[in-house]
Amino acid sequence: MPTKRLKSAACQEQIWQGEDVDLFRLPIMHCWPEDVAPLITWGLTVTQGPFKARQNLGIYRQQLLTKNKLIMRWLSHRGGALDFQEWCDKYPATPFPVAVALGADPATILAAVTPIPDTLSEYAFAGLLRGHRSS
């Protein structure tokens, strides 16, 4: 099920970039007593490799380091990490463009964690699960 493109969306009402990013404003918590730092556990991470037309969706734990820095804890064989590695190979020393959405709907989160073929968009799969197109 193809996605529906919008000119603007509710998810773009608040965009933090650069020095405007203040992760301490978010309720990021320690999940377990022995965690070394607070973690974002269900952030929907959006990546795109330099050779891919599709965007990849994934759920990766993100460890809070500072006001505007996180460590992305992704497995090397997953889509986001593969996109990152391809980006680093093609554009060394250039920051990797990545977005993290907090509060995605259940169908999109389920699509992001389901091992589907790389040729199928997680957005399209989410639309199938939900019964109407992702927008």
Image (cartoon, helix red, strand yellow):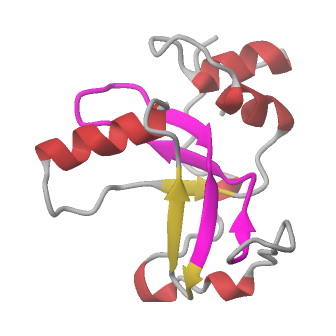
**In the image, residue 45 lies in the stretch drawn in magenta:** yes
Give the residue drawn at x 53%, y 82%. Answer: 21
Question: Do we see residue 105 in this rendering?
Answer: yes
Give the image location of residue 112, x and y in percent.
66, 32
Please indicate, yes or no, whether residue 48 appears anywhere in the rendered image.
no
In the rendered image, the vertical position of residue 120 relative to residue 30, given as above or below = above
Q: Please identify the quarter of the rendering in which residue 59 is found.
A: top right
Drawn side of residue 85 relative to residue 102, left or right:
left
The percent coordinates of residue 134 (x first, y second) are 68, 28
29 relative to 92 in the view: left or right? right
Question: Quick check: 126 left or right of 54?
Answer: right
Query: What residue sits 69% from the left and 30% below the top?
Result: 113
The residues colored magenta run 37-64
Choose between 4 and 51: the one closer to the eye.
51
Instruction: Assess whether residue 55 is covered by the magenta stretch.
Output: yes
Quarter holding the C terminus is: top right
Q: Is residue 129 above or below residue 12?
A: above
Quarter of the image containing the N terminus?
A: top right
Q: Position of residue 22 (x, y in %)?
A: 59, 86
Q: Position of residue 65 (x, y in %)?
A: 55, 81
Q: Quadrant of residue 130?
A: top right
Vertical placement of 13 versus 79: above or below?
Answer: below
Question: Which of the 4 quarters of the picture holds residue 108?
Answer: top right
Left or right, 131 with respect to 52, comes to right
In the image, residue 51 sits, relative to residue 89, either above or below, namely above
Q: Nearer the viewer, residue 70 or 47?
A: 70
Q: How many marks overall?
A: 0
